[in-house]
Image: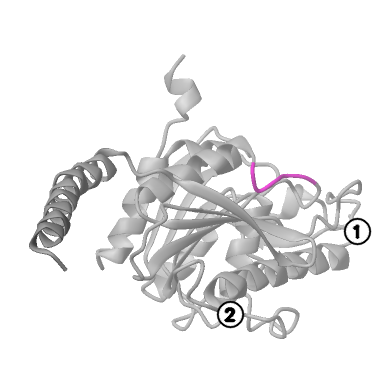
Amino acid sequence: MTSKTTLHIFSYFIILFGFISTSSPAFAQSSNSTPDVVQMKTYNYADTLQLDFYSIPSNNIQLKPTVVLVHGGGFTAGQRNGGDEKRLSTYLAKKGFNVASINYRLSRKGKSFGCDCPTSIKIDTYVEAVADLSKAINYITKDTLPFKTDPTKIFLIGSSAGAETVLNFQFMRYDYRFKRLPYPNAKIAGLVSFSGAVLDENYIDASNKTPALFFHGVKDSIVPYDTNPHRFCTPTDVGYIRINGPKAIAERFSEIDGNYKVYYNEEGGHEWASLGFKFPDLIHEFLMAILHGETTMKDFESITSPIDSKE
C-alpha cells in the first residue's frame, strides 16, 4: 500500500469520525428534547378478550409498576377504549406507569342485571369477570417481554361493574365461589374504585388488605355507598343481594388497620362511576404515595363534582 493511499484512507476516517462526532450529539439532543410519546398496542389475552397496553417504549430493561384498568357498564355494556379510559390510561402512562385497559365478558349483554336477574346469575357474572381479570394479569406478568411489568407493583382501577370486579378480585378469593379461579402470582399494591362494592366485606383480612382509594356518591341507587341491596332491590325480588360499598369496606379496614381514602359526594349518585375519571391527579398522587411507602391514611373527605363546580 502506497503512502498516498494510506493518507487517503486516514483522511477518510478522520472525516468520518468528525461526522459522527458532530452528528451524534445532535441526534441525542433531538431525541432528548422530543417529549415522551405514549404508545398503545392491543393484545388478545384470552380467547376473544383484548387489552390495550399503554406505555412509553424504552430500551431500559427495568420492570415498571403497572395499572390494570377495568371499565364499567353493568356487565351489559362498556369498553376498554372509551374516552375516559383512553384519557386516564394515557395520563398515567405519561407519568411512568404501564397501563393495561381490559375487556372482560359482558355476559349480561342484551339482558337484565337488575332486580329481575336471579341472584345466582349475578354471582356467576361477578365470578366470570374476576376470572377474566385474573387471566389478564397473568398475561402481562407471565414473561418480562414485551410488557416489562413488575409483578410486585400491580395497581387495579375499576369503574362501576369494573370496580366491583376489582374489589371482588382482591377480597373474595377465599369464598368458595371464587377460590378456584386462576389467580396470578402477583402482588396488588393498591386499588382505586369508582362507584364500586364488594360482595362480602368480612372476607377482608390482614392477608389481602391493600391501600384503597374510593370515589362514590352517597345517594347512589345502583351500587350502595354502605351495606345495602344491589340496585336497592326488595327481599322479594329474585335479584335481591346485599353488597358493601366504600363506607362498609372502610369500616372493615379500620378494624384491621388497613389504609383507605374515601372521597364521597353527599348528593351524588352513580354518575361518580364516570366522575372518578376526572381526578387523575388525585389518583396519581395515591399511586405514588404507595410506591414511596407513604400510605398511612384512614380518611373520609367530601368532594365536589367537577361539573357542579363549573356552573
**Residue drawn at the location 47% of the way across and 83% of the way down:** 207
| Residue 246 or residue 5, whichever sits in front | 5
Q: Amino acid at mark 1?
A: Val
| Residue 212 or residue 153, whichever sits in front | 153
Q: Which residue is mark 1?
A: 238
Q: Which mark is residue 214?
A: none
Label 2 neighbour load within 10 Å: few <14, some 14-19, many 20+ = some
Q: Which residue is mark 2?
A: 184
Q: Looking at the rendering, which quadrant does residue 152 occupy?
A: bottom left
| Residue 47 or residue 234, whichever sits in front | 47
Q: Which residues are magenta?
A: 77-81
**Residue drawn at the location 13% of the way across and 48% of the way down:** 18
Q: Amino acid at mark 2?
A: Pro
| Magenta residue check for 78 | yes
| Magenta residue check for 106 | no
Judged left or right of residue 155, residue 103 is right
Counting from the top left corner in percent of width and height, residue 293 is at 26, 68
Helix, strand or loop for disc 1: loop
* As drawn, 9 above or below 128: above
What is the distance, in whole Å, between disc 1 and disc 2 at their CAs? Answer: 34 Å
Judged left or right of residue 66, residue 167 is right
